[in-house]
């Protein structure tokens, strides 16, 4: 075991996959000299050279287009979009090309691309550097959407994403890069499309993503002191959704709360609530609750931004309500 | 160019004209379903440029690329039946006239204007990285020059010296908007200077000139010299799509003047000067027509794409 950060785990995943397959390469803004904003690819430029670690101009459409073109010709690009807020510039390439070419080519062209980016709040960056935009990608047939919540997960999931032949939108969280955890020193993979039951419980199922997983676990810990037993599930891959794990859990606990940093309206949290309502209706004691980011731009500074997203206190309050 | 070579290009251009006529006719009968964008008058670019590509070279087309694909060597049957929504189409009949992929022939067409420009850079990167001397070519119109993808893609190809040839097929209209209204500079190729590329504009209705400019650019890309941008100045003598209100953006007189500069007509006159016989040229036309007639009859018999296809290959399911 090694005690490493989320960022370090990511860097190890990069390196292992680049050593394993010479078609894997990085392209993005400052992935080389800086080793990316949170230093995940530090040292890789020196080790693999500029053909494998490509510092790109501030051109998200070109970065994503470069990924599409090179993937069609047999490369396995990891294209980094520094902040998910910048991905709007790359959307055409992701939505109209990466997600469509496999079908438009009768299954002959593969798009083994990882669009790596990071989202969410917690670093006081205001509304154009703090959004949670994962819902956009869940809405596009052809894309896989991954949101790792821990150092262990980010490493295993990134490696699986690189080896997958579908385009993967891999959304990290900017407030997690310095989170530490014990991670095996030997190689491991985490399958895409499989949720992780982070904590077993009997009274309520909390389905949380990314940074919110830690919030949910903290809430569960506090509630256990009151004798309330929470099951916390991290889907890890938000699309395709591991419905089985969620449905089994809710059938057991009979109550469900979905926690996301993204706003509720038109989003993935509503999709999970629908799946639970459709498949667990007879078992539910209470309607599904959603605890999500508010429908607003993320405000500036350390105080207000935390007031518009879920918190441990709000999750505790929701659990108390749903079990009453 | 000697008579034999020019005759080859004449045959290709005429083929594309007659193929386009046939497809347009099928569009008017609602057998080709989607928006159909005729290429009448622009054949010198497809024939002169694209027919020089190898199968392994990549071609990024656009919404008006049925002729481009055929010039690259895709069969007229596979392109025609694609536009007719049949299973034998290059995309199995799921793409239609505006977006299709012929993977075996490395033809990738899409209907988002400008998008192929950065994708070509990515393909060029892969072709270079793998040590081949194949090239990527992106062909787009004057309208695409105002997209962000144009600037981002050209810049990327230029800074990384990628083996890409950019063909700007300036047909003078972005749908209904005349090019002079939406680009401040003229010729459009001036923009190449911003990427430290040579400013090249050729008469897009002169197949020999287009061929020569493309030959040089392809050779440069193959030998590691980096990308080029060629503006082929031509004219779309039919509407943006079949049935568009042309009178809103140009006069009949203007179209008539440009029809006099028809690339096929010009080439024919040159061939006659070089000693070709009228009969010889007429025979070429007859042969093409016979072949296309057979293609159409065959195409009409082909099965339509199915519901199963419509939901297949959306993604590769997880193991």
Image: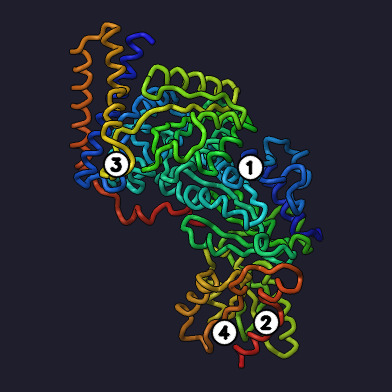
Image marks 1 and 3: residues in contact by CB distance under 8 Å: no
Q: Is B257 displayed left or right of B171 in the figure? A: left
Q: Please report, as a chain letter, where disc 1 is located.
A: A
Q: Specify whether disc 2 shares its chain with disc 1.
A: yes
Number of the front mark, 2 or 1: 2
Q: CA distance from mark 2 to mark 3?
A: 61 Å
For the point 24% across and 43% down, which residue is it? B27
Residue A24 marker: 1
Crowd around label 1: few <14 · some 14–19 · many ≥20 (10 Å): many
Image marks 4 and 3: residues in contact by CB distance under 8 Å: no
- Quarter of the rendering occupied by the C terminus of chain A: bottom right
Q: Earlier in the sequence, mark 2 or mark 1?
A: 1
- Please count the marks in the image: 4
Residue under numbered circle 2 = A314
Q: Earlier in the sequence, mark 4 or mark 2?
A: 4
Q: Position of residue B81 (x, y in %)?
A: 28, 41
Number of the front mark, 4 or 2: 2
Residue under numbered circle 3 = B246
Q: Quadrant of residue B195?
A: top right
Q: Please report, as a chain letter, where disc 4 is located.
A: A
Whether residue A92 can be seen here: yes
SS for dot 2:
helix
Residue A255 marker: 4
SS for dot 1:
strand
Crowd around label 4: few <14 · some 14–19 · many ≥20 (10 Å): many
Q: Is residue B67 above or below residue A37?
A: above
Q: CA distance from mark 4 to mark 2?
A: 16 Å
For the point 65% across and 43% down, which residue is it? A27
């Amino acid at each position: 075991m090694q005690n490493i950060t989320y960022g370090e785990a990511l860097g190890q995943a990069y390196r292992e996959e680049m050593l394993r397959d010479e078609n894997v390469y990085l392209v993005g803004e400052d992935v080389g000299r800086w080793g990316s904003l949170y230093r995940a690819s530090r040292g890789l430029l020196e080790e693999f050279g500029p053909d494998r670690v490509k510092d790109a101009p501030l051109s998200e459409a070109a970065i994503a287009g470069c990924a599409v073109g090179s993937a069609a010709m047999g490369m396995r690009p990891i294209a980094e979009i520094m902040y998910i807020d910048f991905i709007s510039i790359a959307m055409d390439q992701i939505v109209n090309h990466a997600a469509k070419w496999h079908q438009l080519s009768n299954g002959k062209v593969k798009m083994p691309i990882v669009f790596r980016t990071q989202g969410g709040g917690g670093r006081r960056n205001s509304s154009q550097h703090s959004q949670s935009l994962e819902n956009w990608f869940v809405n596009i047939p052809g894309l896989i959407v991954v949101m790792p919540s821990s150092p262990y997960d980010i490493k295993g999931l990134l490696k699986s994403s690189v080896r997958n032949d579908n385009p993967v939108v891999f959304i990290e969280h900017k407030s997690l890069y310095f989170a530490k955890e014990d991670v095996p020193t030997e190689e491991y993979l985490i399958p895409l499309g499989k949720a992780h039951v982070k904590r077993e419980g009997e009274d309520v199922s909390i389905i949380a993503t990314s940074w919110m997983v830690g919030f949910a676990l903290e809430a569960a810990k506090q509630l256990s002191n009151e004798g309330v037993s929470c099951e916390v599930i991290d889907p890890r891959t938000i699309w395709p959704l591991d419905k089985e794990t969620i449905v089994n859990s809710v059938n057991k606990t009979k109550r469900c709360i979905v926690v996301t940093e993204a706003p509720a309206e038109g989003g993935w949290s509503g999709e999970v609530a629908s799946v639970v309502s459709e498949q667990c209706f007879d078992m539910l004691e209470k309607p599904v609750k959603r605890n999500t980011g508010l429908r607003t731009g993320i405000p500036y500074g350390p105080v207000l931004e935390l007031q518009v997203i879920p918190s441990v206190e709000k999750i505790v309050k929701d659990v108390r309500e749903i079990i009453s | 160019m000697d008579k034999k070579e020019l005759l080859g290009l004449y045959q290709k251009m005429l083929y594309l004209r007659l193929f386009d006529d046939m497809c347009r006719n099928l569009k008017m009968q609602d057998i080709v379903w989607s928006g159909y964008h005729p290429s009448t008058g622009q054949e010198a670019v497809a024939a002169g440029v694209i027919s020089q590509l190898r199968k392994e070279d990549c071609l990024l087309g656009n919404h008006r690329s049925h002729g481009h694909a055929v010039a690259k060597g895709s069969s007229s049957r596979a392109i025609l039946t694609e536009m007719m929504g049949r299973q034998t189409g290059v995309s199995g009949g799921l793409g239609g006239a505006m977006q299709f992929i012929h993977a075996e022939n490395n033809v990738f067409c899409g209907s988002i204007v400008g998008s192929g420009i950065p994708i070509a850079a990515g393909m060029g990167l892969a072709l270079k990285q793998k040590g081949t001397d194949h090239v990527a070519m992106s062909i787009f119109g004057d309208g695409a020059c105002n997209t962000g993808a144009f600037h981002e893609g050209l810049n990327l190809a230029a800074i990384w010296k990628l083996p890409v040839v950019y063909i700007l097929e300036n047909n003078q209209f972005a749908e209904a908007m005349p090019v002079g209204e939406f680009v401040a500079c003229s010729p459009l190729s001036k923009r190449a200077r911003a990427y430290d590329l040579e400013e090249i504009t050729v008469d897009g209705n002169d197949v020999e000139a287009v061929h020569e400019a493309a030959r040089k650019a392809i050779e440069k890309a193959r030998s590691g010299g980096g990308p080029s941008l060629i503006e082929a100045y031509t004219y779309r003598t039919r509407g943006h799509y079949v049935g568009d209100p042309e009178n809103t953006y140009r006069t009949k007189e203007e179209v008539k003047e440009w029809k006099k500069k028809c690339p096929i007509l010009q080439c024919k006159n040159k061939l006659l000067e070089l000693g070709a016989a009228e009969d010889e040229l007429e025979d070429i036309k007859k042969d093409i027509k016979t072949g296309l007639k057979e293609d159409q009859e065959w195409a009409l018999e082909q099965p339509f794409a199915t519901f199963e296809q419509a939901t297949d290959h959306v993604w590769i399911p997880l193991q």
